[in-house]
Amino acid sequence: MKYKKFILLSIPILFVIGSLFHMIYEWSGENLLIGFIAPINESIWEHTKLVLIPTFVYYLVVYILKKNDLNKNKWFTSCLLAIVSSIIAIPFIFYFYTGAFGVESLIFDIIILLIAITIGSLLAIHFYKYAKKSLPAIVSILVIILIIVIYIIFTLNPPNLPIFTV
């Protein structure tokens, strides 16, 4: 059950790191390389970056430190699930509350990050505990790297869709 402790601990850690990621592009003097992993504008798409790299790095570091306590395949499949579900949750929740209530609020935006991270973490715990099969760790890691590459491409050349506009 150590996996559960590690994943639950990720919620406050990823929330703090994700919140800091919101500002590191500006702090870097708008360095393009930092822009590949951190929001470069206020679009919903760019805000999903707040969970991508911090989650992957957190799971990677925990695995390196605690690999004897973890099932590698389940751990990295859980990481992939946490990332994808958090990325999906951010625009879903944002568009729901702005569309349903016509409200935009910095406080709500911050709360969305916490909710998205929590959703991803709870799904990761559920998967790790109950999954009979998982992807090989290398496949999960390669899919996460592919997602990162897609983010880099869309940072350089965002599609003309509302989720990519400010």
Image (cartoon, rainbow, N blue to C red):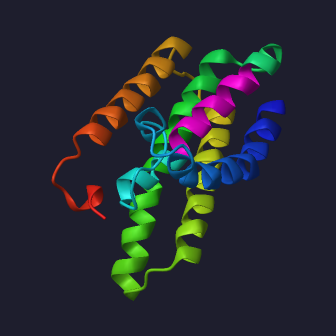
Residue 155 lies, in percent from the top left, at 32, 41
Q: How many labels, in total?
A: 0
Please indicate whether residue 116 sits to the left or right of residue 130 in the image. Answer: left
Does residue 165 lie above or below 52 as drawn?
A: below
Q: Quadrant of the N terminus?
A: top right
143 and 105: which one is in front?
105
Does residue 108 lie above or below 165 as drawn?
A: below
**Residue under the image location 35 percent in, 33 percent down:** 152
Residue 57 lies, in percent from the top left, at 63, 30
Please indicate whether residue 55 sits to the left or right of residue 143 in the image. Answer: right
Q: Quadrant of the C terminus?
A: bottom left
Farthest front residue? Answer: 29
**Residue under the image location 28 percent in, 59 percent down:** 163
Does the segment drawn in magenta span residue 62? yes
Residue 1 in view here: no
Residue 96 lies, in percent from the top left, at 39, 73
Residue 154 lies, in percent from the top left, at 28, 40
Q: What stretch is highlighted in magenta?
A: 51-63
Please indicate whether residue 68 sits to the left or right of residue 21 in the image. Answer: right
Res 19 → quadrant: bottom right
**Residue under the image location 33 percent in, 80 percent down:** 99
Res 156 → quadrant: top left
88 and 126: which one is in front?
88
Q: Is the magenta stretch mostly helix, strand or loop?
A: helix
Residue 99 in view here: yes
Does residue 128 lie above or below 65 as drawn?
A: below
Farthest left residue? Answer: 160
**Residue under the image location 27 percent in, 55 percent down:** 164
Does the segment drawn in magenta span residue 115? no
Res 36 → quadrant: top left
